[in-house]
Amino acid sequence: MPAQSPDDAFPPIRYLGPDDLDRCVALSVDRGWLPEKTKWSLLLAASQTFGIDAPDGRGLAGAVVLTRWAADYASVGMMLVAARYQRRGLGKALMEHLLAMAGAGATVTLFATDMGRPLYEKLGFEPVRRNVSFVGRFKPGGAAGAGAGAGAGIVRAATAGDLPAILAADRAAFGADRGAIIGRLPQFADAFAVIEDGDGIAGYAAAWRNHVTSTVIGPLVAADQEAAKRLVAHLAAGVTTTVRLDLDPDRDGLPGWANAHGLEPAASTLVMAHGEIAPRGMPERLFTPISVALA
């Protein structure tokens, strides 16, 4: 059922679907974000997207995405309000609607920019950890990358038959079912790799274009740092654009290794949570998110 907008000048909040793809892309461009048409297509298909139509008839006044991982666990992404409708209460209305849809008692997480953080704090979100995007042309080889070429297990391209094992490895690490998104990675990603040990698939990673000049490596799930490095090196070897890794800068290992391989710290965000953060899965195996739109 449509929810009320902040004032009568705006239509009610409504569900957005695949037919709204061009409106979502235009909203991203309006705010100076990349168009990311492929990512919007994924989110509109696999998540719940809410929006407010612009009263002037020019697309959307605002939008936000809710992705459910469990009955009590979800994430927020793509929180956007058109520049001409800022400071009208749309962001607050969309977020309050999203939290209501997530359900009482649910833990909801997000990656907050400096611009969005004041609103999230007012709504009760609290900091969990830092996130830094490491971006650049990946430089293989060298002493700093020795660990990426050694270690147990075989890194290879994923196949359709690997998907059940990939989903199981992801569920064990994340502590909830991300199958609605992970199951679409073979079609969404430009490259998809797994690492196998004697017991089967122990980790995986995907590489996907978020723009013609940039490729994100995420999600990245692995048993340890060395396996994570090998997966990144395998995928980055086939990339002709800049590479982006979203990493916890306070976690030893991968940030320094990425920097030594040509990836420089760029944009910084803050992972925040609304509700109690309960222990889930094996967080030490989670190295990069699917996207900063999917905390």
Image (cartoon, rainbow, N blue to C red):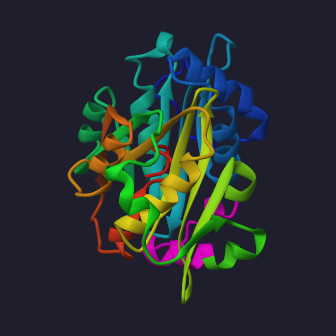
Based on the picture, tell me whether residue 134 belongs to the magenta stretch: no
Q: Is residue 189 left or right of residue 241?
A: right
Q: Residue at x 37, y 58 (%)?
A: 146
* Nearer the observer, 160 or 97: 160
Based on the picture, tell me whether residue 171 belongs to the magenta stretch: yes
* Nearer the observer, 240 or 76: 240
Question: Which residues lie in the magenta part?
Answer: 166-184
The image shows residue 9 at horizontal and vertical percentages of 54, 17
Q: Is residue 176 left or right of residue 246?
A: right
110 in relation to 195, above or below: above
The image shows residue 200 at horizontal and vertical percentages of 58, 85
In this orientation, does residue 105 appear? no
* Nearer the observer, 220 or 89: 220
- Asked where in the image residue 227 lies, by quadrant, the reply is bottom left
- Asked where in the image residue 179 lies, by quadrant, the reply is bottom right
Q: Residue at x 36, y 46 (%)?
A: 258
Q: Residue at x 64, y 27 (%)?
A: 212
24 in relation to 124, above or below: above
Magenta stretch: dominant SS?
helix
The image shows residue 57 at horizontal and vertical percentages of 69, 13
The image shows residue 108 at horizontal and vertical percentages of 39, 56
* Nearer the observer, 270 or 49: 270
In this orientation, does residue 34 appear? yes
